[in-house]
Amino acid sequence: MADQKKLIPPRLNQMEALREIPIKSLETYEQIEKTEDTERKPEKKKSSNIERVREGLRKKIKKASFEYSENIVAFDKLNTKQQKVLRSVIDPKRIDAPLPDEKTEAEVREFYQTHRENNWIRLKNALWLVTFGSLSGTEKAIKKDLRHIRKERGIDVMYYPGSGYDVIPRDALGTDYVIHLSLEEHDSYYRMKHAQDGLRGYKEHDMELVGDFRSSPLKDMSVDTVFIKGIPIHSAIEAEDDFYRVLKNDGILLFVDDRSMVDMGLLKKEINKKFIKIGQRGCIEIYQKRIILE
């Protein structure tokens, strides 16, 4: 008769062998496995936790500092002077504030229908543009006039509302003196501007803000020059209070008299309510704030 142990399958032998192992030794084996697992993964867990803490700190810093706002274009690429200028003129509470509601097309048409000038004024403005526009309204002439005004009156910080991709003031005065403001989500102004600079081989960065000039993110009385050129007249009239707010008491408003625009007379009439004309250089009219006592 064959030995019974030889007839037991190997698997059963293993099970029997496991039964013979003391329970305490099994517990210690499980503990060893757990400790080995924890020794393999602690660094990953710690690094991920540290990364979460860092990310939380980054978010707090972004909330506390306007420099990380999406409404400031490439702040970290600006030079030291430009960053200093923006820190001095931007109101952190206003940089990410909701924008004013846009007028509908019907409201804009109604505005121009109400304030439409007669045909004679339009013809007179067209004749002026044909006669003098080629001399005084060109880019070269405006740059020359801006340099003259800076030399005569001094310009430390110029605010260019509704600049779009126009760079005439920047080319005349330099990147450290002009703050551009436009609406990127409504127009491809910034992309056009950067493409234009790229074609010209221009490598410096400008002070650019995304916003509505009717409610700009600038502090009260923070700039010494406001430059108005080519913006829609109905929007310019709505923004007159904001132009007045951000301009210093001894500052100047420079208004490019482009008579090809509709209702230019109405815009001048509105400007004269809060500003007084003190001079003119070429096609650039120079205004100063009227000090309104409350």
Image (tube, rainbow, N blue to C red):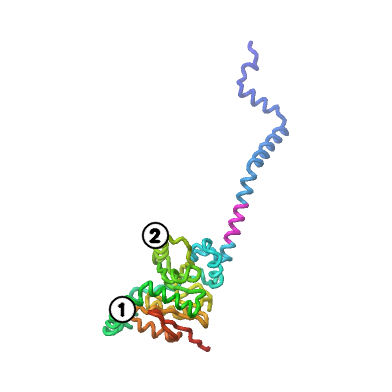
Q: Earlier in the sequence, mark 1 or mark 2?
A: 1
Residue position for label 1 = 129
Picture quadrant where residue 284 is located? bottom left
Residue position for label 2 = 199
Residue 107 in percent (x, y) is at 35, 77
Viewer-closest of 39 and 181: 181
Amino acid beneath label 1: Leu
Residue at image position (40%, 65%) is 189
Q: Which residues are magenta?
A: 50-59
| Residue 53 among those drawn in magenta | yes
Q: Residues within 10 Å of mark 1 (few under 14, many from 20)?
A: some
* Position of the N terminus by quadrant: top right
Magenta: main secondary structure: helix
Cα gap from disc 1 to disc 2, whole angstroms? 30 Å
State whether residue 245 is above or below residue 19. Answer: below
Amino acid beneath label 2: Leu
Viewer-closest of 6 and 55: 55
- Residue 232 visible in image: yes
Classify residue 214 as left or right of residue 39.
left
Mark 1: secondary structure: helix
Classify residue 16 as left or right of residue 104.
right
Q: Is mark 1 in CB contact (under 8 Å) with mark 2?
A: no
Residue at image position (57%, 66%) is 65
